[in-house]
Amino acid sequence: MTKSSSVAMKGIRLVYVLLDGIGDLPHPLLNDLTPLEAAYTPNLDALARNGAMGKVISVGKGIAPQSDIAVFNMLGYSFKDGSYVGRGVIESIGCNIDFRDGDLALRGNFATIDDKLKIVDRRAGRVISSEEAKAVCKTLRDNIRFSDKDASIALEPTIAHRVVIRLRHAKMKLSDKITNTDPAYDKIDGMGIAKDTTGEMFVQKSAAEEDSDQARTAAKMLNEFTTQVVQLLRDHPVNRARIAAGKKPMNCIIARDSGNRYPHVDPIDKKHGISVGCIVDMPVEIGISKVLGMKMFQAGDVNDYEEKAKVAAKSLKSVNAVYVHIKGPDEFGHDGDARGKKKNIEDIDKRFFGTLMNELKGSSTAIVVSGDHSTPCVKKGHSDDPVPLLVSGSMVKQDGSARFTENYAKRGNLGLLMGADVLSTAIKMVAG
């Protein structure tokens, strides 16, 4: 009997919820509590009382990870050998850009800059309509011209300030060994690592990190792209309208996390011995799901929490486990909005977890809750702080946890886990 069938015969049913950027630090506006501690979360707290808690270092000690590599780790894939392909590739897969080995894919942000290339806002106010993004990208696609006639570009806006860039050269494979133009992130072994963003930031010039024509050409293409974007968007109609409406112009694109090859990993069903589906919204999570071969279930828009809960419960008729990614908390963390993050957590508790628990009432389904990384409001960015972990269900030995918070996570019986071990640990606990 295979591992998959033996586990499935035990009737394992598991909902695995990752709350994006949920971890935080005490905040003065919340009486020195974290948003989780300050929030009214009766449903999460009920789950905590019926389970065991721990804390998780999602990628590595001292690493403030981006969501892509953090999610891969939280699903059991650590890339310890430095083989990670970069977020640009994952997002290009997620939004169906034509990508082949030797192309260079990067994640981009529409940003607001001043005349000296100082970054005023890395996300151009965050509120960007699909129509605005499409109009701007059409202008760029129609007008960008590289000095090398064999160079070309594909550009795809995704959600809000997010955009995917694909560079291609007709006569060579491009190297991914180049630096970012986005100063908020560094790249180590293909992984995007958040940097301190409390000081002034300027658009960076990309540089080759190896002595090769492939790297020098890639860096030159990215720099030509950046220069032309600034020129073409300086007086763009979309930006004139945004400024007139009191919004920040989207007058630059900053890029990071280059990658030049398609990833090849074991499918998640094979890795864990159970069938795993997912409910995801963002291009990066969609890309991860495609790479890992997960069955994707449609469940409304990003903030349709009730629908996500209902679909998650129903999906367990066809898969053993479903991974649900909920985006909300991370954005409030980036904005430094502690009160907003607290309210968002309360909204998720009531609408998602309240609905989920009602849908699963009377079943033996386990619910696992954690985060991909911490996004403390006081830092306005990702940090290396551990995230809380909860495994809840009738088959789990309770450890006296009373609330789903960072403090209870520190005291929980599950101790300190690495992200890559979380799902396999939960499966073992649930399978008995």
Image: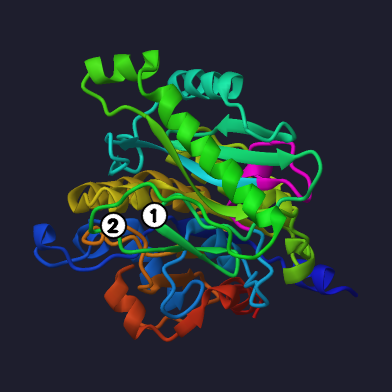
| Nearer the observer, 77 or 163 | 163
Q: Is residue 326 magenta?
A: no
- Residue 100's spot in the image, x, y percent? 78, 45
Using the rendered image of the protein, determine whether residue 70 is visible from the camera's viewpoint.
yes
- Choose the circle earlier in sequence order: 1 or 2: 2
Q: Residue at x 32, y 27 (%)?
A: 249
Q: Which coloring applies here? A: rainbow
Three-letter code for the amino acid on which mark 2 is drawn: Thr
Q: Which residue is under mark 2?
A: 41
Residue at x 23% of width, y 46% of height: 340
Q: Which corner quadrant of the image does residue 142 belong to?
A: top right
| Looking at the image, residue 45 lies above or below residue 234 | below
Q: Position of residue 420 (x, y in %)?
A: 59, 74
Q: Quadrant of the C terminus?
A: bottom right
Q: Indicate left or right for 268 with 181 as reference.
A: right
Question: How far apart are labels 1 and 2 at the CA level?
Answer: 36 Å
Residue at 60% in and 42% down: 221
Look at the image and tell me in which quarter the N terminus lies: bottom right
**Secondary element at tag 1:** loop
The magenta stretch is 86-104
Nearest to viewer (mark 1 / mark 2): 1
Where disc 2 sits, the SS reads loop
